[in-house]
Amino acid sequence: MSSPYFFIKKENVADNSIVISGINYNHLVRVLRLRAGDAVEFSDNESKRYRASVAEIRKKEAVLVVKEIGNLTKSFPQTALFLCILKKDAMEYAIQKTVEIGIDEIVPVFSDRVVVELGRDKIKGKILRWQNIAESASKQCRRDFICRVKDAVKISCIEPSLSDIFFIPVERELFSREGISLAKLEDFLRNMGGRYGNKTGKNEADMNEADMKEAGPKESVKEKVWQEETWKEKAKKEEAENEEAEKNRRNKYTQRLQKEEYKYKNEHGILKNLRKISYIIGPEGGFENNEIAMLVKKGAVPVNFGKNILRSETASVYFLSVLDYIFKTSLSS
């Protein structure tokens, strides 16, 4: 069984000890009923992670002794969700689940079709509640850092250019009707290495031999892998004479080439340099056409999730899962 996990402030740590009070104290003592010697883990939400054990439980505070300290570093790209304000349950579900997946920042958005009416005083209370939900979800899944819920903004105030990539989902019918160019997400992401990983500015499919030389060592990667696999073939001539061995060799070459090309794109292309990826999800009634046109004009990349129409809270979770797999899981592997 894993140890309980809490977020604390740096000022709670001093002289190799951690002092807990308030809400965390109530949870630790009255809910979890921890006793002296029990292990607890903490994050200061800035740079350190602590493993400690309970030393003393007082009337209004608990004292723990630090046993181990680790460093925290933020991973990139950071992800931000611009979420048009939804009805209570849908909004809270979207916040909780995207935080569990790993969203770094959530920005509530007022758009024309938002049906929830919130005054200035009421929105402050909502932001506080949403932040508490985000912090609880961050603690539950033992994140290094708490997801931030920022102040609400009007959709007209959003600047996609502040993110390296800013996605906006649009229904397929709008692309032809409004003249918006549709880029398939998989094609867009596949071509990013070609767009940003070479000096020609061309996609790899459109590059000739001279372009490849200018772009960098991509062609040399192919030659390197082929020569190495050919050398291994010569070293084992008896295997090369066998048809099955030849098939295996070519399959191995193809696999190695794919890995080398992917590694090259990661090292020299956009994937390595991205700092922030954002996406926006509309309200229950969707976006107005002029809102889509405005964001696309500012640099947002329109994408389509397929023929199924997703609820806003479902779309929030679905698209983040796609981004998380592509930009985090793939890079770490």
Image (cartoon, helix red, strand yellow):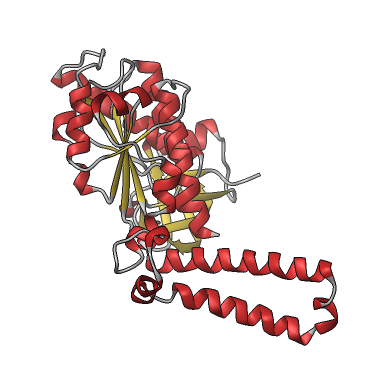
From where the camera sits, is residue 74 visible?
no
Instruction: Identify the residue at image location x=17%, y=38%.
Output: 297
Q: Quadrant of residue 58?
A: top left
Answer above or below: position of 237 versus 87: below
Answer above or below: position of 314 versus 242: above
Answer above or below: position of 165 versus 112: below
Q: Nearer the viewer, residue 142 or 210?
A: 210
From where the camera sits, is residue 291 visible?
yes
Instruction: Identify the residue at image location x=44%, y=20%.
Output: 309
Q: Is residue 323 left or right of residue 233?
A: left
Q: Quadrant of residue 304?
A: top left
Q: Nearer the viewer, residue 127 or 164?
A: 164
Instruction: Identify the residue at image location x=47%, y=41%.
Output: 322
Q: Is residue 188 left or right of residue 65?
A: left
Answer above or below: position of 102 versus 65: above
Q: Quadrant of residue 184?
A: top left
Q: Position of residue 286 (x, y in %)?
A: 30, 19
Q: Is residue 287 left or right of residue 187?
A: left
- The N terminus lies in which quarter of the figure? top right
Q: Position of residue 319 (x, y in %)?
A: 43, 36
Instruction: Identify the residue at image location x=47%, y=63%.
Output: 69
Count the marks: how many? 0
Q: Nearer the viewer, residue 41 or 274?
A: 274
- The C terminus lies in which quarter of the figure? bottom right
